[in-house]
Amino acid sequence: QPSLLDATKEKRGGFGVRLIWFHHIKSLTKRKAIVASARELRLAGFCKPGFPGLVCCEGDEEACASFVAAIRALRWQAMDVRWQHTSPSAPRRAAPLPEPFRELSEGAMGEAAALCEGAGWHGAFREAVLKLSAASTSVGG
């Protein structure tokens, strides 16, 4: 059976970022599937389980799209890709998102915000999670 990574190998192109909000991420099975899928696709980022749930990932654009499709198929009470960005190449910055992709603790929204800020996605975090204006953030895609 082909893997998620196999499905993206022929379509490589560009750099993508996704911030995905969930009403909650509690199921241990779904939590493991999120981490496993992201790692298989070689995406950087994190999952913050609990209420609300948050997934932030970055890497190959096609891998990001495949990842969203794979986790959407798990069926959720509420799941929303609240912010996405696509560019020809990865930005230069001091602190990209964690690699390999990892799970944070349920109470780690502050850590999630700090990771997004370090990666240059703080405005996107504010817009997607806190529903605040991100006027200083260039939103693509």
Image (cartoon, rainbow, N blue to C red):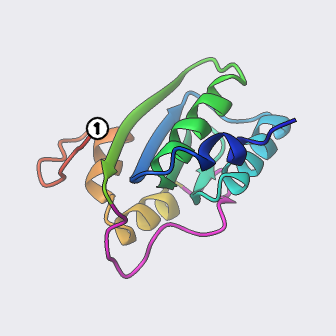
Tell me where residue 87 appears, x and y as whole percent. Answer: 30, 53
112 sits to left or right of 46: left
Taking the image as drawn, is residue 102 in sight?
yes
Q: Which residue is mark 1?
A: 141
Tell me where residue 118 appears, x and y as whole percent. Answer: 38, 72
Position of residue 62 relative to residue 103, above or below, is: above
Tell me where residue 29 appears, x and y as whole percent. Answer: 85, 37
28 sits to left or right of 96: right
Q: Quadrant of the N terminus?
A: top right
Q: Quadrant of the C terminus?
A: top left
Q: Residue furthest bottom?
A: 94
Residue 98 is inside the magenta segment: yes
Judged from the image, the secondary structure of the residue bearing numbered disc 1 is loop
Tell which of 9 and 53 is nearer to you.
9
Specify the quadrant of the image occupied by residue 84.
Answer: top left
Q: Amino acid at mark 1?
A: Gly
Tell which of 132 and 12 is nearer to you.
12
Please give the name of the residue rendered at 28% of the width and 42% of the height, measured from the top-left corner: 127
Main SS class of the magenta portion in the image: loop
31 sits to left or right of 20: right
Please give the name of the residue rendered at 22% of the width and 44% of the height, measured from the top-left corner: 139
Magenta residues span 89-108
* Numbered label tally: 1
Taking the image as drawn, is residue 130 in sight?
no
Q: Residue furthest front?
A: 10
